[in-house]
Amino acid sequence: MSAAPKASKAPRKRLNIALQGGGAHGAYAWGVLDRLLEEESIEITGLCGTSAGAMNAAVVAYGLAKGGNAGAREALTTFWTRISEAAKQGPLQPSFMDRMIGTGNLDFSPGWMFLDFIGRLFSPYQLNPGNINPLRDVLQGCVDFEFLKRNAVAKLFVCASNVTTGRHRVFQDEEVGVDAVLASACLPFLFQAVEIDGQHYWDGGYMGNPPLYPLFYNTDTPDVLIVQINPVSIPEVPRTAQAILDRINTLSFNSSLMRELRAIHFVTKLIDKGFTDGGRLRRINIHTVDAEEHLSRLGVSSKLNADIGFLRSLHEVGRAKADAFLRDHADKIGVMSSTDIEAKFL
């Protein structure tokens, strides 16, 4: 009697990931990614990131190339641990009062107070003439970009803002090296503009946080999961100078994403009415994982808090949010959007 045939393995759910920037808040995305990568049923086909999102994207792409989902999880843990270790050498440390309050902010940190004050008077060209960026050593120690270029299994895109032309640039695949990622994360009040091929770049969040179009133009995966760090809505009107500046930055960093989602919503409505422009229009399924109720309570100083306890707390929030997404919406991947764009963003 012949053995019964083995059941065929279900095809993996294919997913593109779009990662917003937000400094140390990128540890929230670490948690989201860590939980998603536990699911062997999910295949990440493309990653697009800005600023901290670009770092997460590059680390995940390298980890996937090196050792699959498990390799990506290990690479992320190594990266964020080294970020925290590097930060211990700098002045931005939580004070005793900050730790007592336990919000994650650095509002009583002497290092933060000094940086906030001096950054209004002097530029990085004056304060850091040697253009020292500790992120370079961390990235180079965590990602072998030459290996990644030769062995990538997921498409990789990182966004930076061209300082002189006012345009954004998306570096992709073999163009992505340590300079491209640092350009995407170059906050102009902390670091000198990053020069690549004679052009100078600042943080990509000013122009695309992150752009979505590289994912659906360059992959055949219709599903995009946006790991949202910058809150769209906040509970109250900012009243302090620092809170007002933080909200201005958040609005600026969200604006390009919301414009792009508005266009996707418009195209989706056309498709729903039967217009596909001869098949050239295709449906994009949008999914989101956010923690607005948690991240909206954090001040701007917390984005520079790389204390390992704070990073791990954000990681746990991210894991919990991703777990809820998988529980409630995993069955929608490849089928339909789980996010109502009009209700959430428009």
Image (cartoon, rainbow, N blue to C red):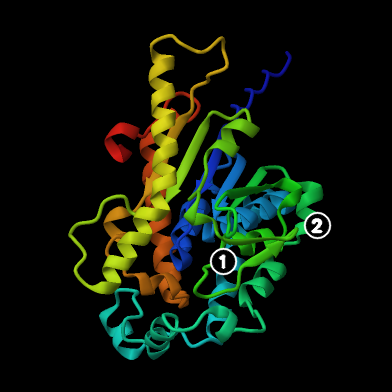
Disc 1 or 2, which lies upstream in sequence? Answer: 2
Asked whether disc 1 touches disc 2, contact meaning CB atoms under 8 Å apart, the reply is: no
Q: Label 2: which residue?
A: 146
Q: Which residue is mark 1?
A: 186
Neighbor class of circle 2 (other Cα within 10 Å; few <14, some 14-19, many 20+) is: few
Above-or-below relation of 342 to 136: above
**Element type at marker 1?**
loop
Place residue 124 in its image quadrant: bottom right
Question: Dot 2: what SS?
Answer: helix
The residue under the point 53% across, 86% down is 90
Where does residue 295 sit, x and y in percent of width and height?
A: 33, 60
Residue 290 location, x and y as percent?
A: 37, 49
User: Is residue 337 left or right of 174 when viewed as pictured?
Assistant: left
> Looking at the image, can residue 63 be seen?
yes
Q: Which residue lies at the image location 32% right of the left edge and 67% below the top edge?
A: 245
Q: Quadrant of residue 302?
A: bottom left
Residue 166 x %, y %: 55, 53
Q: Which mark is residue 304?
A: none
Residues 5 and 341: in front is 341
Where the N terminus falls, by quadrant? top right
Q: Residue furthest front?
A: 164
Amino acid bearing label 1: Cys
What residue type is disc 2 on?
Glu
In which quadrant is the C terminus drawn?
Answer: top left
| In this picture, residue 149 sits left or right of residue 259 | right
Between the residue at mark 1 and the residue at mark 2, the CA separation in whole angstroms equals: 22 Å
